[in-house]
Amino acid sequence: MIKVVVCGASGRMGQTIGRMVNESSDLELVGGINLKPGSFFGIDIAESKNAESLLQSTRPDVLIDFTIAHAAVGNVKMAARNRVALVVGTTGFTNEQKAEMQKAIQGNVPAVISSNFSMGVNIFWQLLRDAGKLLKDYDIEVIEAHHRNKKDAPSGTAKTILQILDEEAGSRKKIYGREGMTERGNEIGVHVIRGGDIVGDHKVMFSKNFETIEISHRAYDRSVFATGALHAARWVVGKKPGIYGMSDVLNLGK
Ligand SMILES: NC(=O)c1ccc[n+]([C@@H]2O[C@H](COP(=O)([O-])OP(=O)(O)OC[C@H]3O[C@@H](n4cnc5c(N)ncnc54)[C@H](O)[C@@H]3O)[C@@H](O)[C@H]2O)c1
């Protein structure tokens, strides 16, 4: 059995992951961590100030983090100190926070970090690489929509989309929404929608005179992210220290 601790256990993703670990036959839920203590699926949730003693008493194989950027950086450092493999789904990191995590992980533990654990989105990103190469002279717009409680914008998935477009279609200025008198240049327009309980929608539009090509993905249920995160948890245990992406887990190439 692979022993799992979930950070952000009381959150939307933490609850979905806890339920799916609890229902699986090869993963064992040994603890949860959140800002306040509690329990989930018959297991204790420790408050975050007691997280390290929870890790030391439960000795998990993998820590799965779906919290908030500043908390995730601390959790990554804690897991690295205790040689616990990592799956990090939290988004909204600054470049400095990414560098801090990389320093903590390198040489110490294996970690899968991805702004989106759904298999569909990882295939969507791959399709986008091909589209970006072929559609360099098209106008590009990126649109994403999420539930009203999402804290970071644009989404981590949209930021990965922009990075892929920079790599494949050439680096372009980004404009976040438009208002007033605007003139389209060679920028990428980025548009963020927040409302209700939208799980996660992403669309990239490539437009030229008389035609538009759209590539889009819609998640209907958080279980698609949780399924991918658990797949990554099974894969990461026993790997060499370093940072991996879902493309490594799914063997998708770059
Ligand atoms: N990579 C993916 O596939 C994917 C999918 C969905 C969401 N996300 C990201 O995962 C994160 C969580 O999303 P959510 O919808 O579950 O949010 P949420 O707000 O429902 O849950 C986050 C939980 O983390 C807890 N928390 C905050 N600080 C903490 C700390 N120091 N220690 C432990 N717990 C702490 C909060 O109390 C909350 O319960 C967000 O960054 C979101 O963008 C990623």
Image (cartoon, grey):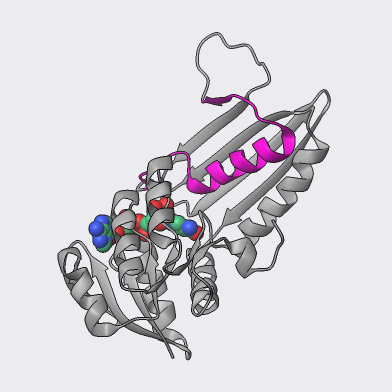
Q: Can you name the residue that lies furthest to the front here?
A: 107
Whether residue 11 appears in this view of the structure is no
In the rendered image, which quarter contains the C terminus?
A: bottom right
In the image, residue 227 sits, relative to residue 161, either above or below, namely: below
Q: Which residues are magenta?
A: 150-176
Name the spot of residue 183 as percent of width and height, x first.
Answer: 63, 11
Name the spot of residue 27 as percent of width and height, x first.
Answer: 44, 85
Is 29 covered by the magenta stretch?
Answer: no
Q: Quadrant of residue 53?
A: bottom left
Name the spot of residue 42 as percent of width and height, x first.
Answer: 26, 85
Name the spot of residue 227 as percent of width and height, x first.
Answer: 52, 72
Name the one closer to the observer, 109 or 92.
109
Q: Quadrant of residue 66?
A: bottom left
Residue at 57% in and 45% down: 160
Is 170 covered by the magenta stretch?
Answer: yes
In the image, residue 229 sits, relative to residue 106, either above or below, namely: below
Quadrant location of ligand 1?
A: bottom left
Q: Quadrant of residue 231?
A: bottom right
